[in-house]
Amino acid sequence: MINIPKGTQDILPEEAPKWQYIENQLAEIAKSFNYKEIRTPIFESTDLFSRGVGDSTDIVQKEMYTFMDKGNRSMTLRPEGTAAVVRSYIENKMHGHANQPVKLFYNGPMFRYERKQKGRFRQFVQFGVEAIGAENPAVDAEVLHMLYHIYSSFGLKSLKLVINSIGDVESRKEYKEALVEHFTPHIGDFCQDCQNRLHTNPMRILDCKVDRGQPAMKSAPKITDYLNDYSRQYYEEVKGYLDELGIPYVEDASLVRGLDYYTHTAFEMMSEAEGFGAITTLCGGGRYNGLLEMLDGPNETGIGFALSIERLLLALEAEGIELDTDERLDLFIVTMPETMRTAVKLIADLREAGIRADMDYLDRKVKAQMKQADRLSARYTFVLGSNEIETGTVSLKEMTSGEVTDVRIEEIAAHMKERK
């Protein structure tokens, strides 16, 4: 027997409605903020991610699914969405569009070869947004508002929005130098990854899960002490907008994002629900002011976030929230062998009229068919026998109340819609 690959999952029919509900709601919220959907390929040139995500990141070094295609080109299954969206923005010259900034959202599978954990898979589904073409604290606030609105719209209460500023390029340069000076005397006590990052990307050391308990980690310099005037003012304006919008947040000077292209605003949404798990992060994002140029694009800036639908489902479970996914069948037709041809045509007409309908295909007895209708939670059912066809009338039974109404066959759809 061939089994499912490790770190992946089948979304079975009983779970699929939750996914559909979530994905539809995410798309509607994004559209209400005037974000448009973009769909990019599932695989891209490896160079896109090594340059855009960063050679020093765990994603590029350890987690990417990379292969050589038949043209001897290195290709990678996308590990995240931002780099691909930015590649499309550049390639399709969206910076020349009349409407700016360009506001986009995406939803689809991503792939990372990492250790399987609760709520984390090697193939996972990510919803994300990107606003490209405006460096304005109000845009940052808009993105954070959308993020908070998304989680709140599902009824989640145990939320914590954590924000920080990691400054502009000038601020980060001075800060990185301070980190190298601070960590150099202690680097021998750190893991090999941190030792490798000391001179390539020392900010990534702060994001290390292995060495988080090291004393040198707790005494490390804070980026907020190295922000220049512009970065500090930008951060204050972002917080001012959040206060105006009534969005609660917590500042954490140690928060850095794991990708190389972030500048200024960085943020994470956490779940504080009991039983959610040791890894509390639901979502992360931030502003990127160098990514487009890094990918040979124009000198434009963007901000965005990406959330895992798997972890959103975990948060809903932790807070005991049931989604309103009504998958009940509208109608089940109980058939007889002699009325099968008529039933096939009738059910086709009802489906085209927007009625969720099904029927028996196994020549079961009436009693067995009624049990099937009950298992399917059908709202209505009726028996279609020779007599019903002759009279042109069926006895439509409402399954919850048991009420029976005689209805002309040609009026079934209208009658059900009216009662619904």
Image (spheres, rainbow, N blue to C red):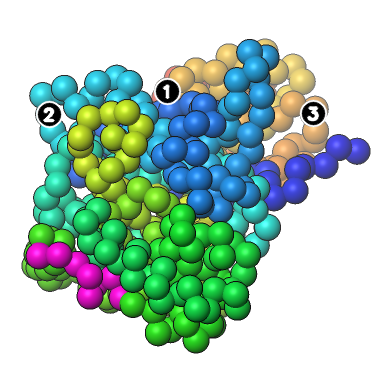
Marks 3 and 1: CB-CB under 8 Å?
A: no
State the image quarter where residue 116 is shown.
bottom right
* Residue 70 appears in the figure: yes
Residue 52 drawn above or below residue 92? below
- Mark 3 / mark 1, whichever is N-terminal: 1
Magenta segment's dominant SS is helix
Task: Quickly name the residue at label 2.
Answer: 99
Q: Residue 235 carries which label?
A: none
Mark 3–mark 2 distance (CA, rounded to whole Å)? 57 Å
The image shows a total of numbered marks equal to 3
For the magenta stretch, what is the residue range? 222-229
Name the secondary structure under disc 2.
Answer: loop
Residue 341 highlighted magenta (yes or no)? no
Q: Mark 1 points at which residue?
A: 353
Residue ID at (51%, 27%) = 44
The structure residue drawn at horizontal position 48% and vertical position 73%, both measured from the top left corner, is: 184
Query: Is 225 colored magenta in this rendering?
Result: yes
Question: What mark, if any, has residue 362 been given in the picture?
Answer: 3
Q: Which residue is drawn at 21% across and 42% down?
A: 301
Crowding at label 2, few (<14), some or many (≥20) Cα neighbours within 10 Å? few
Task: Residue at 13%, 55% (x, y): give it.
Answer: 137
Tell me, yes or no, if residue 400 can be seen here: no
Q: Is residue 230 left or right of residue 353?
A: left
Q: Give the residue type at disc 3.
A: Leu
Quadrant assignment for the N terminus = top right
Q: Earlier in the sequence, mark 1 or mark 2?
A: 2
